[in-house]
Amino acid sequence: MEEHIAKSPRPSSPIMMLAQSFALLLSTIGIGQALATPLAVAESPAQDSDLVVMYEWIDDEGATFTVYGVDESTETSPSEANPLKRRCGSNQVQCYGNNVASGWACEYLLSGRMFFYDRPINDHRSICVLMPNHIDKCCVSWANDLRGAKVAHLVNAGMKTLNQCGGVNSKTVSGKARDVNLNGVCTTQCLSNRAEGCNNN
């Protein structure tokens, strides 16, 4: 009767044993999975604004005006304006070094060239102008719902901010006016290069 002798497994080579040990180590500490999975790329911070373009137009000089308002689909509750304070209207200005605008563009925006100067602000929150060179830009923005106020009411605090934070010939205009009286509403108003406001503070 023929005997069948079971053969023992062939001994692993030192290199194979080392590879197996390394794979076991990676599996134990979880590095194996990390190496097999691409690293997630962090997304850019989201804009801190829910503003949408309400309308825009190009004037006879080639400057582009854009009016922004609050996206009603993301607004959780109506913005409440501060009641008019006894001393409101001082237009106290603080200048910033970021989100800087062109003084020339700001003067153009505030000088009365906007054909809708007497238009009610309603649910608008900012108005921007991009000059014909597509470089110089300026935006005026405000904090509260100002139904009943008009665009012309933005001029006083806007010009004070422009003059104190660089002037017409400056390329670094950025500032906020506090205690601004906009048709009986006490609020803040900004002048900068973005529709969302001059500064996050």
Image (cartoon, rainbow, N blue to C red):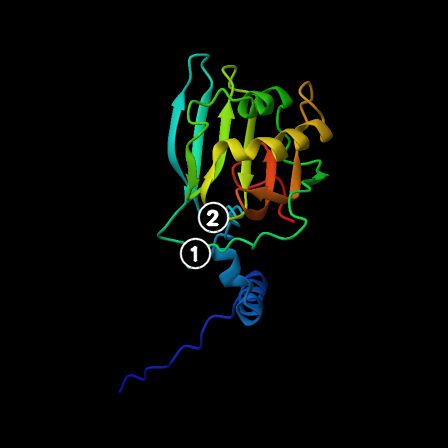
- Badge number at residue 145: 2
**Whether label 1 touches label 2, CB < 8 Å:** yes
As shown in the figure, which amino acid type bears the numbered disc 2?
A: Asp
> Of helix, strand and loop, which one carries label 2?
loop
Q: Residues within 10 Å of mark 1 (few under 14, many from 20)?
A: few
Secondary structure beneath dot 1 equals: loop
The residue type indicated by label 1 comes to: Pro
Tell me the tag on residue 108: none
User: Residue 82 in the image: x percent, y percent?
Assistant: 56, 54
* Residue 191, quarter of the rendered image: top right
Name the N-terminal-most of marks 1 and 2.
Answer: 1
Q: CA distance from mark 1 to mark 2?
A: 8 Å
The residue tagged 1 is 78
Vertical placement of residue 123 versus 164, above or below = below
**Relative image position of residue 123 (x, y in whole percent):** 41, 44
Of the pair 43 and 55, the residue shown nearer to us: 55
Q: Is residue 35 above or below residue 150?
A: below
Q: Residue at the location (43% across, 33% down)?
A: 67
Q: Give how far across and how far down residue 45 sits, in percent.
A: 54, 48
In this view, the residue farthest toward the bottom is 1
Relative to 116, say whether 75 is above or below: below
Q: Nearer the viewer, residue 156 or 66?
A: 156
Q: Position of residue 137 (x, y in %)?
A: 55, 25
Of the 4 image quadrants, the one containing the N terminus is bottom left
Residue at (46% x, 23% y) in the render:
114
Mark 2 nearby-residue class (10 Å; few <14, some 14–19, many ≥20): many
